């Protein structure tokens, strides 16, 4: 399987990766989450085993599984490496590794490859699309290619390092996650004045003196109204009974009411 420090991934291992990349999420269900998709992806490895061992391996791979799609190849690489080395003798180890690794990798992966990219790239691409720029689509294509590259590297790392991969790169991934979080917050903060359109409409008048609340707010903090709208949306999303659809509808209602009451313009 290896020559020096280089590790040659088996033909079945490569098939496992591409099955997961294109169809791994298609078998999702509420009972075993990604379990069926994981089993489908691992079928080439299962069929490679002895006939009497295939049933046992199939049961192991059909167990409950739920993690981030981009990070899952790390686990699959470890799984493939163990099967190539010991076959069905490693079923207990595989089950334990899947259970132990899918939780931590889900937290890291959801942050690095779902929440942050969706927020940063989605915000930038949306603003570009509003301006009529085709680069909005190219941004997502580039991210898709980058994600594929990362998944291939993760699979190779898992295959090469086996169970040690999580402890070896865990600290580095935490630092990357923290840096990415800071970047995401910075981008969102910079885009608020450009994307969210809201102004204070109230004006105070006393005789010949007239004071605009918007002018007063601009002197205290420019773009205060859009910032308050965003904070209000994030606060609503933190409520137990709220989801993105309800928050959107509520913001529409609040916007209509505030406009007609001359609170916002």
Image (cartoon, grey):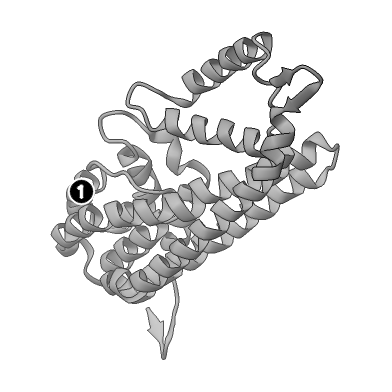
Residue nearer the viewer, 196 or 89: 196
Q: Is residue 163 above or below residue 51?
A: below
Q: In which quarter of the image is residue 50?
A: bottom left
Q: Check the image and name the residue furthest to the right.
A: 132
- Residue linked to disc 1: 60
Q: Quadrant of residue 212?
A: top right
Identify the image quadrant of the N terminus. Answer: bottom left
Residue 45 image point, x, y percent: 34, 56
Q: Check the image and name the residue furthest to the front.
A: 207
Residue nearer the viewer, 185 or 206: 206
Q: Tell me the residue at 42%/60% (across/down).
A: 12
Q: In this view, does 86 lie above or below 112?
A: below
Residue 120 image point, x, y percent: 61, 49
Residue nearer the viewer, 140 or 155: 140
Which structural element holds mark 1?
Answer: helix
Q: Is residue 43 above or below residue 132?
A: below
């Amino acid at each position: 399987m290896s020559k020096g420090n280089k590790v040659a991934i088996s033909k079945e291992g490569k098939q496992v990766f591409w099955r997961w990349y294109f169809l791994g999420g298609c078998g999702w269900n509420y009972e075993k989450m990604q379990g069926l998709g994981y089993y489908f992806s691992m079928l080439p490895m299962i069929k490679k085993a002895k006939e009497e061992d295939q049933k046992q391996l199939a049961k192991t791979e059909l167990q409950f599984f739920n993690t981030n799609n981009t990070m899952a190849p790390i686990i699959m690489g470890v799984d493939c490496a163990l099967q190539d080395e010991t076959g069905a003798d490693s079923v207990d180890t595989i089950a334990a590794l899947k259970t132990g690794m899918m939780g931590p990798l889900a937290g890291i992966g959801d942050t690095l490859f779902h929440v942050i990219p969706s927020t940063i790239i989605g915000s930038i691409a949306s603003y570009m699309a509003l301006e009529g720029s085709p680069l909005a689509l190219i941004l997502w294509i580039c991210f898709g290619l980058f994600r594929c590259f990362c998944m291939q590297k993760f699979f190779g790392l898992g295959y090469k390092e086996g169970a040690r991969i999580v402890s070896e790169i865990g600290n580095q991934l935490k630092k990357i996650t923290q840096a990415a979080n800071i970047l995401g917050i910075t981008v969102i903060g910079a885009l608020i004045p450009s994307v969210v359109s809201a102004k204070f409409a109230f004006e105070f008048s006393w005789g010949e003196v007239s004071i605009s609340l918007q002018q007063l707010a601009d002197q205290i903090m420019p773009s205060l109204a859009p910032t308050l709208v965003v904070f209000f949306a994030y606060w609503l999303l933190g409520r137990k009974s709220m989801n993105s659809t309800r928050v959107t509808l509520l913001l529409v209602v609040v916007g209509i009411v505030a406009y007609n009451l001359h609170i916002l313009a």
